[in-house]
Image (cartoon, rainbow, N blue to C red):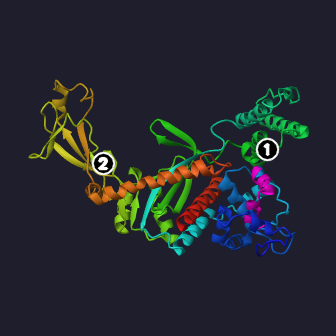
């Protein structure tokens, strides 16, 4: 059954919170800032209201996940810290002497209660709502960008992942007592997944039975990660490294295996919208969705700032239609003209045709591509093939046996011409300088809230992680600006 509201349990030690947790404590301020009752409303249909014992308070479970994101902890370490950290217990609305949950409940909560509930949009919407109520968001500009997150299981086999993590556990133990080598089970000689899982379980059992090392953070963190890998993702391990993760490219010569989070952020550095995709997806294709989501969250969007990935023709047309100023440079291929061998073919403005380096002029021009079909049209210039066959400069220009010789030049669309003019203006250059802000936000997500690597396998898990991380950084930013 679902409890109806979160409240403190009566306790003779409740006054400890007022004595030991200062007014400026981050968790105290977050608890005062946000009315978490929305969690009951959103999860109401996901619990049985007639049968069974009362479930663990869903707000408390939600706050556990929030703490996990704030402090970048594994489930087991999060629960362990909740036993002794009074600021955690205060935030969770627990009595100081109250017991904590079993870490396995967090996995069940993520998979059974939060799945398919559009948590990302919900939590971003809540923080934007708070920011607008507090008068923090005043700008009408959003900055857009994408950041990548590596899959928890890279392009390695599940056996390799387990071997790496069990090795870290053994190394942590050996620095304390090398004699434990003789106590550990023999490593599997097969490449069977079940054998590797069985070995890891035996290794954990030996360490826990010994009891000397489990209380040491150096050992417990590596051990808890190995246990969580086996328990939380056993189903994924038996089928694939990560079935949803894909290879994406950060540049021409660097790639990653995982996911992309496409972000829109106000000039006050509050994230107003996000979408999470597999790693290979294009940044520019998400722009219109980010704008619409930002509007749905309460933003009035008049300007969008982004890099060249967002200046594709469809986005320019969309921005124009919705009277939005798009501060995104065109790709150099468009502004400079998509024209090969510029030094070999010169345009004769009087004839309106191109002339090759041998001095032969094109005999006719044809236009290819349909207007308004998304891709730029091209002018194709046809040369006299008989002259090309006999030309002394034909090497590298005319391919032996070819039945025609053409030279093509892309035609800028009306949208591209106007955007090219706009990007040379002082207003464009001034606004483009604000783009750095979102790069700092991406760095904060990765380096302070564990967003560089996925907590679990699958796109659903990545969306939950993204929702919690963005909710966290938005609340922290709101509190910062309220000061």
* Residue 397 at x, y percent in the picture: 24, 30
Q: Which image quarter holds the C terminus?
A: bottom right
What residue is drawn where x is 16% and y is 41%? 354
Give the label on residue 334, or none: 2
* Residue 435 at x, y percent in the picture: 42, 54
Q: Which image quarter holds the N terminus?
A: bottom right
Tell me which segment is drawn in magenta: 77-93
What residue is drawn where x is 76% and y is 72%? 6
Q: Nearer the viewer, residue 183 or 202?
A: 183
Upstream in sequence: badge 1 or badge 2:
1
- Image check: 348 left or right of 422? left
Mark 1 or 2: in front is 1
* Residue 199 at x, y percent in the picture: 83, 34
- Image check: 235 left or right of 289? right
Outermost residue, right side: 209
What residue is drawn where x is 55% and y is 65%? 478
Q: Nearer the viewer, residue 147 or 384?
A: 147
Q: Please, what is the dominant secondary structure of the magenta stretch?
A: helix
**Could you tell me how far apart the alpha carbons at marks 1 and 2 are, in whole angstroms?**
53 Å
Q: Are marks 1 and 2 in contact (CB under 8 Å)?
A: no
**Residue bearing the label numbered 1:** 227
Secondary structure at numbered mark 2: helix
């Amino acid at each position: 059954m679902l409890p109806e509201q979160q409240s403190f349990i009566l306790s003779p030690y409740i006054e400890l919170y007022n004595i030991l947790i200062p007014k400026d404590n981050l968790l105290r301020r977050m608890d005062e800032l946000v009315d978490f009752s929305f969690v009951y409303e959103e999860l109401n249909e996901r619990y049985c209201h007639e049968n069974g014992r009362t479930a663990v308070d869903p707000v408390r479970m939600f706050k556990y996940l929030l703490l996990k994101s704030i402090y970048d902890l594994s489930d087991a370490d999060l629960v362990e810290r909740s036993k002794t950290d009074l600021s955690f217990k205060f935030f969770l609305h627990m009595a100081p002497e109250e017991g904590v949950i079993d870490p396995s409940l967090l996995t069940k909560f993520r998979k059974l209660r939060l799945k398919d509930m559009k948590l990302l949009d919900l939590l971003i919407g809540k923080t934007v709502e708070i920011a607008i109520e507090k008068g923090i968001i005043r700008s009408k500009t959003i900055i857009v960008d994408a950041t990548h997150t590596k899959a928890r299981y890279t392009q390695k086999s599940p056996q390799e992942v387990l071997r790496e993590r069990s090795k870290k556990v053994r190394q942590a133990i050996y620095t304390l007592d090398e004699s434990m080598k003789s106590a550990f089970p023999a490593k599997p000689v097969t490449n069977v997944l079940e054998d590797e899982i069985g070995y890891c379980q035996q290794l954990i059992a030996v360490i826990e039975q010994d009891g000397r090392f489990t209380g040491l953070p150096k050992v417990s963190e590596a051990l808890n990660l190995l246990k969580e890998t086996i328990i939380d993702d056993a189903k994924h391990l038996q089928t694939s490294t990560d079935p949803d993760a894909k290879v994406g490219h950060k540049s021409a010569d660097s790639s990653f295996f995982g996911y992309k989070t496409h972000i829109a952020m106000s000039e006050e550095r509050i994230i107003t919208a996000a979408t999470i995709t597999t790693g290979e997806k294009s940044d520019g294709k998400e722009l219109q969705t980010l704008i619409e989501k930002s509007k749905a969250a309460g933003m009035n969007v008049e300007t969008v700032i982004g890099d060249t990935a967002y200046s594709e023709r469809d986005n320019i047309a969309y921005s124009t239609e919705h009277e939005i100023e798009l501060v995104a440079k065109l790709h150099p291929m468009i502004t400079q003209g998509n024209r090969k061998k510029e030094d070999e073919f010169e345009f004769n403005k009087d004839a309106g045709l191109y002339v090759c380096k041998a001095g032969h002029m094109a005999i006719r021009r044809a236009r290819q591509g349909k207007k308004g079909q998304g891709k730029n049209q091209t002018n194709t210039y046809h040369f006299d093939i008989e002259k090309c066959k006999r030309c002394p400069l034909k090497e590298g220009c005319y391919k032996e046996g070819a039945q025609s010789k053409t030279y093509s030049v892309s035609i800028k669309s009306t949208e591209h011409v106007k955007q090219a003019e706009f990007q040379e203006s002082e207003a464009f250059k001034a606004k483009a300088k604000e783009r750095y802000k979102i790069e700092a936000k991406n760095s904060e997500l990765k380096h302070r809230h564990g967003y560089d690597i996925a907590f679990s396998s699958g796109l659903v898990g990545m969306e939950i992680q993204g929702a919690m991380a963005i909710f966290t950084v938005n609340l922290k930013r709101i509190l910062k600006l309220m000061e």
